[in-house]
Image (spheres, rainbow, N blue to C red):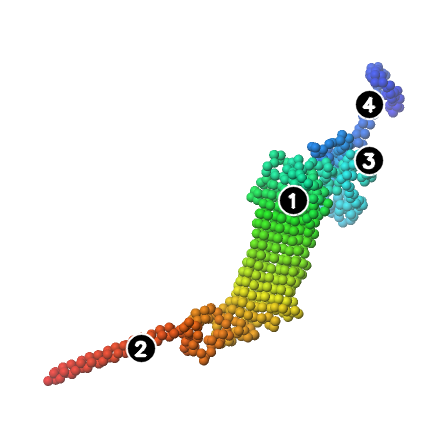
Amino acid sequence: MPQLHSDALRACAPVVTTPPTTTSASNSSAVANTKTCPNLPLTATICCKALLLLLLTLGCLLSAVTCVPAAATALAAEPAPALHTSPPTPSLNAVVDAEAFLASKRHLKRSLTVTSQETADKNNAAAANSDLDDDYYDEEEADAGNGSENVSGRQRRHHELSQTARFGYDGNKIKPQQFYTQQMVANALEGNTNTGTQLARPNKEQSPMAAQVNNDLSIWSLMDNARRMDICDVCSCVRDIYVHVTCDYNNRKSRTPLNEIFGPIYRIPNNTKSIEIKLAPNTHFRLEKDLFDNNIVLNSFTIVGTHSSGEQVEITTGAFPGNASIMGPYPDIVMQNVFSVVVREGAFSGSKKFTVRNSNDLILYSNAFKKAEINGKFFGIADLRIEEKAFNSADAKLYIENSHIDNIYRFEASMREIKFNNCTINTINSGSFDVNSIFNIIFENSAIGIIKSRSITEKLLSKHVSFTGGVIGYIEGEAIHGSGIGELILRNNSIDTINENAIYVNTINATIKDNHIKHLGQHWLRIKEWSNIVIVKNSFGDFGGIIVEETKEPLDCRFESNSVTKPKPGSLNIGNRHCILREIIVDLPCRCNLEWLDTYSERDLRSEIYCTIDRKLGVCFNATTFNMQRYEHEVCDEKKTTLDCGANRNLKKVNGEFFTIEELEQQATQFVHIIYLGTAIILAVVLLIILVLILRCLCQQRKSSRGASASH
C-alpha cells in the first residue's frame, strides 16, 4: 500500500508541480486535468485523493502553529486601546501636513497590533496563573506543604519561581526612564531624520506611539505651543503692548468647557499681562498644571464668581509653578466671590500673591504652599480650613479678615507675619506656632474660644505677639510657654479665664493694658529676661498674682492703676525690687485694722492700695474708693472728732462712727421727742395708778360701811 501511494504521487507530480506560464494556460491546464481525471486508471484516482488529503493535513498544521488562542477574548475584555494611543486631534486653525498624517496613521496601526498582542499575552498569563480552584496547599492531599510529592499545582509553580518573582518582580534590571523635549517628540512624529534626533527604544525597536516616550503620558502635551489654538479665539482679548484676556462664561455664546479652554488645547499668548475668568453659576473649574508656558509677563490671574450659586475652583498640584520662565515675577492670583475654593497639595511654589475674597469655604490642604514664598490675603471667608502643615517650610505672610476658622493647626513654617483681624477662631491647638520663627503674630478684634496648652512654645522666636480688642474664652496653662518674644501685647481684651502658669515668656517689652479678665490662676504671668513691663488700667476678677524674675537690664516695671475684685492671698506680692506698684484698687472695705492688708503682700502697700468706703464717707470725699494711708490718717485717728468734707459738710465722729450735722441734729430732735414721749407715758402710768388706788379705796370704804350697818 505505501508503494502504491508513492507511485501515485510520482504519477501526479508532473501535473501538480508544473508551474503555469500564464493565467490562461493555468486555467486550461486545470480544465484539462479535471477532464482527464475521470478517465484515469485506478492508480491516478488514488493519487488525486492522497494529494488532497496531504494538502488538508498541511493546512491544519499551519493553522495550529500560527493560531493565537484567546486573542479575541482578551481584546473583548480590555477597553479599546485607541483611547490611549490615538494621536491628538489637530486644532481647527492648524495646518496638517499630509506626510505627517500618513506617518501618524502608520504609527496607529502598529500600536494597535502591538497593543493587541501584548494584551493577549497578559491575558494568557493571567489565565494560566488564575487557578481559582487550585489553592496553594491542596486540602485533599494529606502531606501537602510538608515536603511530600503530593502538592498542588500552585505550590509547585510557587517553588519553581525565584524568590523575588514570587512577589511580582521578574528579576530583570529596571531601565531608567528617558526624557525628551517636545521638539524631539514632534520630530519623531513627523519622521524628521535631518535633525539627528534619535529616540532610544528597547531592543532598537520602532516605538508604536510617540506618547510612550512622553514624560507625563499626556497626548496633548505632545503638541507644540505654536500648534495650540489661541485662547483669544474663545475669550475676549484687549491687545496693546500686552494682552489682557477676559473669559466671561456668563456671556459666551460658545459653551466650550473651561477645563478645555484653560488646558493643553489652547495657548495663552506669551505677552499676556492679565487673565480674568468670570464663572457661570454652579461651575466646577479645575486649574491643572502646564497651563502656563513662557508667560513671563503675566502678573495677574483673577477668577470671579457670584458666591451664592455654588461655584467651585480647585487648584491642583503644580497649577502655579515657581519657574520664572513660566509666569511673571510675583504674580497676583485672586479668587473673588467664588463659593468654594480648594487648594491641593503642591499647588503653589515660587513667589506668589494669593487673595481670596468673599467665599463660603476655603480649604488649604497639607503642603499646599510647601517651600513657596506666599503673600496670602483672605477676606470674608465663612469657613476657612487650614490643614496641618499647609505652609510647610514656606516663607509666608498671611492676612485674614472677617473670617471664621474652626481650628488653627501646626503651621510648620517660619513666616514673616500672620495677622487675624475681626475673625472668629474656635481653637488654637497645641503646637500651632511651634516653629522656629514668625516675625509677627497679631490677633486684632477677634473672638477666640480657647488657646490650648503649648500653642506657642519655647521653639518660637518672634519679634511681636499681640492680642488686642478681642474676646477670649479660655487660655490654658502653658499656652505661651518659654517663647522668645521681642514684644508681647495684651490690650483691650475681654478674657474669661487665664489658667495658672498660662503665660511664661522671655520678652524685652511686655504691655498688658485695658483688659477685663474675670479669672486668673496662680502665677498666670511669668516674665524673665525683660527690659520693660507695663501692666496698667486692667480690671482683674479673681487675681492669682504674677512673677517677675531678675534681669540684667531692667528699665521700667509698673503694676499701676489696676483694679482687683478678689485678690488671692499673696497675689500682690511682686517680689522684684525693680517693679513699682501704684494705685491698686481692691474691692474690699477699708478697715483700721491693717492685718487684712498683710495677707496680700509682704510690702507696705498702704500708700498704693485703694479700698472701698461707705456711702457717707464717699459723699464726704466724693469717691467710692479711698487711699488706705489717707483712710488711716483721716478716719482711724482717734484724736480726730471731725472730718472736714468742705462746703460745711463736715462729719462728726461719735463712738467710732461718723455723722453729719444734720444727722446729729435729727438725732437730737428725735431724742427730745423720745424724752417727751417717755415723760408723757410715765405721767399717764402714774395717773392710772393713782386712779386705780383711789377706786380701790372707795370700794373698801363702801364695804366697811355695809358691814357696820349689818352688824347693827
Residue 193's label in the rendered image is 3
In whole angstroms, how far apart are the C-alphas of marks 4 and 1?
A: 80 Å
In whole angstroms, how far apart are the C-alphas of marks 3 and 2?
A: 137 Å
Residue 476, placed above or below residue 30? below
4 or 1: tag closer to the N-terminus: 4
Crowding at label 4, few (<14), some or many (≥20) Cα neighbours within 10 Å?
few
- Name the amino acid type tagged 3: Thr
Tell me what residue is drawn at x 57 percent, y 68 percent: 559
Which quadrant holds the C terminus? bottom left
Residue 208, placed above or below residue 556? above
Q: Is residue 468 visible?
A: yes
In whole angstroms, how far apart are the C-alphas of marks 1 and 3?
A: 41 Å
Residue 140, placed above or below residue 702? above
Point out the frontmost of discs 4 and 1: 1
- Name the amino acid type tagged 2: Ile
Q: Residue furthest left?
A: 712
Q: Is residue 160 visible?
A: no
In whole angstroms, how far apart are the C-alphas of marks 1 and 2?
A: 98 Å
User: Measured from the top left, where is residue 511 in percent x and y?
Assistant: 59, 64
Point out the frontmost of discs 3 and 4: 3
The residue labelled by disc 2 is 675
The residue labelled by disc 4 is 52
Tell me what residue is drawn at x 62 percent, y 64 percent: 509
